[in-house]
Amino acid sequence: MNHDSASCRVSVDGIAVIPRVMLRWSDLPGRRVGLYGLGVEGMASLRRCRALDIDPVLVDDSPSAATDLGVLETSAGGLPALAGCEVVIKSPGISRYGPVVSALRDAGVTVVGGLGLWLAGSDLSRVLVVTGTKGKSTTTSIAAHLLSAWGYRSLLAGNIGKPPYDPQVSEDYDYWVVEVSSYQATDLPVTPPVAAVTSLHPDHLPWHGGDPEIYYRDKLSALAQPGAEVTVANGDSALLRSHAELLGPRVRWVHAADDPDAAWMDALGLIGLHNRRNALIAAESLRAMGIAEASDVSSLGLGAAGFVGLPSRLREVGRRSGVAFVDDNLSTNVLPALAAVDAFPDRRVALIVGGQSRGIDYAPLAVGLRSRVAPLVLVTVPTNGPDIHAQVAAAGAGPSVSIVDTTSLEQAVTMAAGWAEPDGVVLLSPAAPSFDLFRDYRARGEAFVAAMLACGGTPAQ
């Protein structure tokens, strides 16, 4: 295998394809290496470089790392320093379509990602890659939990867990279950024999050049690099089916209605048909990897016991009399918000939406709510709440849906709690990121709980 080979394609259907270079961590010693971005993965890459006796150039757009690391600011000498490197390992949050990475490629620099370097040098038969617009974290967590419960040494890694190449992480595992974001997907030069995709919906468009089709191609590229054999895919997604040519050579479609008697999933304690499908995708992926326990009903039941769902993923955080307060604030686009609503088909739902504007189309939210029979009030919050209101109203959400604007999350929770009485749901599934008014989704979740307590709710035990 030529570890410096790259694709010569420049476009597919008019969409630029950035060549991927097959490099491993073990190929880097002796080369001039730069690190671009010093976040969680950047620091893990720095530790890996040092373990390999590599002294990399360190560059960040807004250096916040300790000054004794000698981090250069990109706009103050950092770009020329990176341009003098042979290989630059960039953090996933830095777009491959941005001006800095484009300038590096034009200068002949090979730009890679830490996860891609690790995959290229791994035993891929023991790696499961999971991607998807939403649902990938839950699916990854279920798969890793099942493996651990069956006695295998498994690492939950990637976007949700630890960078598997970090020297602080042991290499003594039987299996690695790796969540891959659309950002990371563009850095992968190989795909394990089994990979999974949970959903597809427009997201992170600024990173992907503002084009949904570029996002789809980037996201799904994690499934179809050299080595790919089987893709376990969400068969209920029309978008995935229409982009099936971007999946692996063989596809196993999984539907939420499959295996209706699979009682083992009850032990997971998850709400909603979409989470049922996520669990089925996890189990099917492990079966495709040849793990015997995944084909045994009793083993699945034993393995599912003790699973703890992820924070801010459709979790009930408290009650006020018969009204339930549900935190699903990791919902950052329309798809998961609709899935969350569908988890409560027969109850009054006050759906709190809004956050950082990301330029996505909210008309599909109206379309998805049209078939709703039980009453729903859409409670909007800053900063893009008014825009969501306007788009949903223009598209028409149906007779069961009303819309109310509020000026804060606290006001929204108070209003929603009163409307949801006596036995409805106050659902924070904002269909937008949190970074406009909050540090991150955790801070937004904490604010949601605080507002619930302030209006007389009690926390879940």
Image (tube, grey):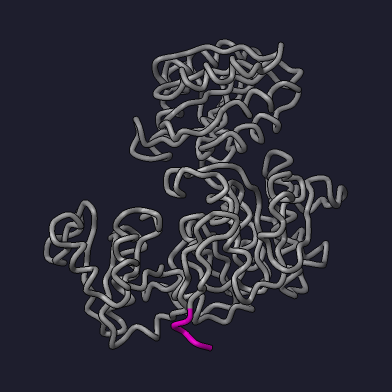
Up/down of 67 relative to 289, above or below: above
In screen coordinates, is 60 left or right of 263?
left
In screen coordinates, is 93 left or right of 377?
left
Between 247 and 421, which is closer to the camera in this rendering?
247
* x and y percentages locating residue 248 in the rendered image: 69, 66
Q: Quadrant of residue 282?
A: bottom right
Residue 188 covered by magenta stretch: no
Q: Residue at x 37, y 69 (%)?
A: 111
* x and y percentages locating residue 289 in the rendered image: 71, 73
Residue 238 shows in the view:
yes
Up/down of 369 relative to 407, above or below: below
Between 418 and 368, which is closer to the camera in this rendering?
368
* x and y percentages locating residue 415 in the rendered image: 50, 12
Image mark count:
0
Q: Residue at x 13, y 57 (%)?
A: 76
* x and y percentages locating residue 446 in the rendered image: 41, 33
Q: Residue at x 41, y 26 (%)?
A: 450
Q: Residue at x 32, y 72 (%)?
A: 109
Up/down of 391 relative to 170, above or below: above
Residue 423 shows in the view:
no
Q: Which image quadrant: the C terminus?
A: top right
SS majority, magenta: loop
In screen coordinates, is 309 left or right of 457?
right
Magenta residues span 1-5
Up/down of 142 relative to 290, above or below: above
